Image (tube, grey):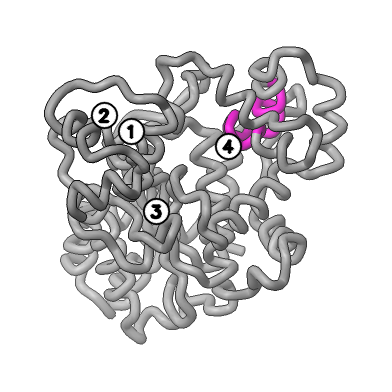
Amino acid sequence: MTSAAVADAANMTLDTLLTVETEPTALSKAKIVALAGALAVPVQFLFYRNLKIEPNLPDFRTAGNRPAVLTSAGLARVEKARSILSYLEDEIFEDDLDSGLVGSATVKGGVDAAAKLLKTYYSPVKRADGTVDPVATFRETRVAIEKDGAIVLCEKVNNDGFRGFCFSERGHFPLILINTANQRPATKLFTLMHEIVHIILGRTGVSDPNILENEVERFCNKVTASVMMPRQEFEALYGRVKQNSVRTTTDAIAHHFGVSKSAAALRITELGLAADFYGRWLAALPPRIPPIEEEEEAEASTGGGGLGAQIGRFGYLLPSVLGKAVKQHSISIFDAYRLTNLAPKTLTELAQIGERKLEH
């Protein structure tokens, strides 16, 4: 785009845009959002230094049918996922493929029908006080969806706005990748659930907080919210915890359901429990926090290395499928190594754990 075209799309003068490009310039929030929209990038990308943006995947779309923005690191993860799926297209893996999972619902079928399917995979683990533990729930929900043939990988991709993506096509293994960078447990769990809806719809896509006007993304969010925050229970809880402070109310609801604060605030607005609650919650956040992020909260994050870390990265299904093929001499252990970069001993151990974990 030319500078004149960007200025026109952002509804600002060319002189103002040229000033922004050459020297520090104070802009209103509205102008910053408009400029980000004109460039089809997340707002926070405007504040990065030395940001490299490469050509984007045509099947990951944002508002106005523009391509989603992924950094080179994000694109590398996407291509790695594609290479795994291409390898698994071989007929030797057909017995492990559950083709009935993909495309079992449609957007036209409505939120309720898709939510009914999503509930079969959601496995909430509750603490002693009845609140949902997002760490344990993520683990159990991941196992539930992997038992039905979906690969779930977790990778840390820093400085990239996407939270996850999903490849979901009939006749192929569906694959979810969760970007664990800067995602707290509650957000990571919501992302996993959102991507499972993509599988149910049979629609490839990317989860990015900036994708707001895409019909499929909105639908996935609504289905996920309806399952994680059931209307009747949600309205009852809201009636008990609502206070004058929108942040205090949001915090209590988010903790109870094990969801992110933004998801809880948006649910209040969607159910019509309080006028423009989500907007008021955003306005109440401290100014130092970028609009796309939330304040830190005291949630423990998993860490460490060794076998546990590799399980966290690769889950159970992929090691199990590869390990079985190696055991049957259908593929070489070195092929599995090239695909995962896992040492043969580690892959063998993960495969054994995966087989036991995924037994129905």
Under mark 4, the amino acid is: Ala
Under mark 2, the amino acid is: Phe
Query: SS for tag 4?
Result: helix
Which of the two discs, 2 and 3, sits closer to the camera? 2
**Residue that label 3 marks:** 177
For the residues marked 4 and 2, what is the alpha-carbon distance in whole angstroms?
35 Å
How many labels, in total? 4
Of callouts 4 and 1, which one flags the residue occurring earlier in the amino acid sequence?
A: 1
Q: Is there a contact, CB below 8 Å, between mark 3 and mark 1?
A: no
Structural crowding at the residue carrying mark 1, measured as other residues with C-alpha within 10 Å and reported as few (<14), some (14–19) or many (≥20): some
Q: Is there a contact, CB below 8 Å, between mark 4 and mark 2?
A: no
Under mark 1, the amino acid is: Gln
Which of the two discs, 3 and 4, sits closer to the camera? 3
Query: SS for tag 3?
Result: strand
Q: Residue at x 28, y 51 (%)?
A: 70
Q: Residue at x 72, y 66 (%)?
A: 110
Q: Residue at x 43, y 72 (%)?
A: 173
For the residues marked 4 and 1, what is the alpha-carbon distance in whole angstroms?
31 Å
- The quadrant of the picture occupied by the C terminus is bottom right
Residues in magenta, as a range: 252-265
Find residue 147 and report its horizontal and vertical position in percent. 55, 62
Which of the two discs, 4 and 1, sits closer to the camera? 1
For the residues marked 3 and 4, what is the alpha-carbon distance in whole angstroms?
18 Å
